[in-house]
Image (cartoon, helix red, strand yellow):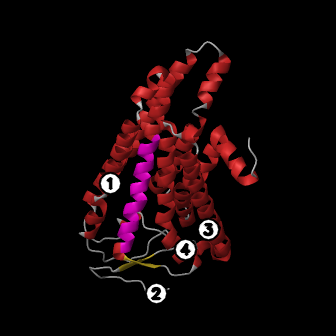
Amino acid sequence: MRSVQTNTSSTTSFILTGFPEMESLEHWLAALLLLLYVISIVGNALILFIIKEEQSLHQPMYYFLSLLSVNDLGVSFSTLPTVLASMCFHVPETAFDACLAQMFFIHFFSWTESGILLAMSFDRYVAICNPLHYSSVLTDARVAHMGISIIIRSFSMVFPLPFLLKRLPFCKVNVLTHSYCLHPDLIRLPCGDTTINSMYGLFIVISAFGVDSVLILLSYVLILRSVLAIASQEERLKTLNTCVSHISAVLIFYVPMISVSMVHRFVKHAPEYVHKFTSLVYLFVPPMLNPIIYSIKTKEIRRRLYKMLLGTKF
């Protein structure tokens, strides 16, 4: 490993770390991460291909699923270069600007995923609570506008982060605790005042994740109220079953995110590998599980997968 830079006002690179505490398992960890990448990339690419080819899936719900798959591919490709370099090829150093760029894209795709999950909850709300107006409310144009709005919101929130960091002098040890660049990790390193960075980071977390999660919860309260008004228990279960995939996607996104936040703030004295593991779960698990969940729960996607794999019509 190259020597660590200290006592300089202009850090030109950062040192990324994998799991030095588990050096004997390093090759197995690298193999596991590569497997997760393959599952995520192939799974989400298949979802996009199937939705494109299957005419019956050209509906608002699956347009949002397409956005989610594109976003999950973005998350995977954002972390892939440095994870491969540091854990597989033992090249832990990354340039300052490259690190800021990676940080931007990781957080951009995280914020975008939260917005997509909110849009998908609105889709479920309209489909269940106002089914007669579903096609008039969620037109193709409106779905496109919602997607563009989600992207613009995420970009606007994350765009200032690299510039707020770049104005600060980095004169401490430039070793990061992960094999990729995250904002909470980077703001520990400057020797200047990071109050503005911390306050802005808290603001965008509350205004994006906080607001989105509350609105998603509210949509499901309204959905549950509407479902409970259905007389037939069989119909109630059938209606709720249409939400299972989305609820699962929400849980596998927000639960790891909350775990990362809780560990970072309240379990500061936990071993360093605990912090790294929760962060890996947050970034790696949703892109891997989302295509699996939707493949299992969506009959049209499942049928097309069987046809592709077995060459049999179902």
Q: CA distance from mark 4 to mark 1?
A: 26 Å
Q: Is residue 21 magenta?
A: no
**Which residue is the site of mark 1?**
155
Point out the stretch of residues depicted in magenta.
Answer: 98-117
Q: Local crowd at mark 4 within 10 Å, few (<14), some, or many (≥20)?
A: some
Front in this rendered view, residue 310 or 207: 310
Q: Quadrant of residue 214?
A: top left
* Residue type of the residue flagged with mark 1: Phe
Earlier sequence position, callout 1 versus callout 2: 2
Q: CA distance from mark 4 to mark 3?
A: 8 Å
Q: Would you say the residues marked 4 and 3 are in contact, meaning their CB atoms lie under 8 Å apart? A: yes
**Which residue is the site of mark 4?**
84
* Residue type of the residue flagged with mark 2: Arg
| Residue positioned 57% across, 65% down in the render | 273
Q: Secondary structure at mark 3?
A: helix
Q: Which callout, 2 or 3, points to the residue nearer the camera?
A: 3
Residue 155 vs 298, above or below: the answer is below
| Residue positioned 44% across, 54% down in the render | 265
Q: Is residue 108 magenta?
A: yes
Q: Is residue 153 left or right of residue 126?
A: left
Q: CA distance from mark 4 to mark 2?
A: 18 Å
Q: Is residue 271 left or right of residue 101?
A: right
Residue 81's x, y, as percent?
A: 49, 72
Q: Local crowd at mark 1 within 10 Å, few (<14), some, or many (≥20)?
A: some
Would you say the magenta stretch is mainly helix, strand or loop?
helix
**Which residue is the site of mark 3?**
34
Q: Local crowd at mark 3 within 10 Å, few (<14), some, or many (≥20)?
A: some
Q: Quadrant of residue 181?
A: bottom left
| Residue positioned 41% across, 37% down in the render | 140
**Which residue is the site of mark 2?**
2
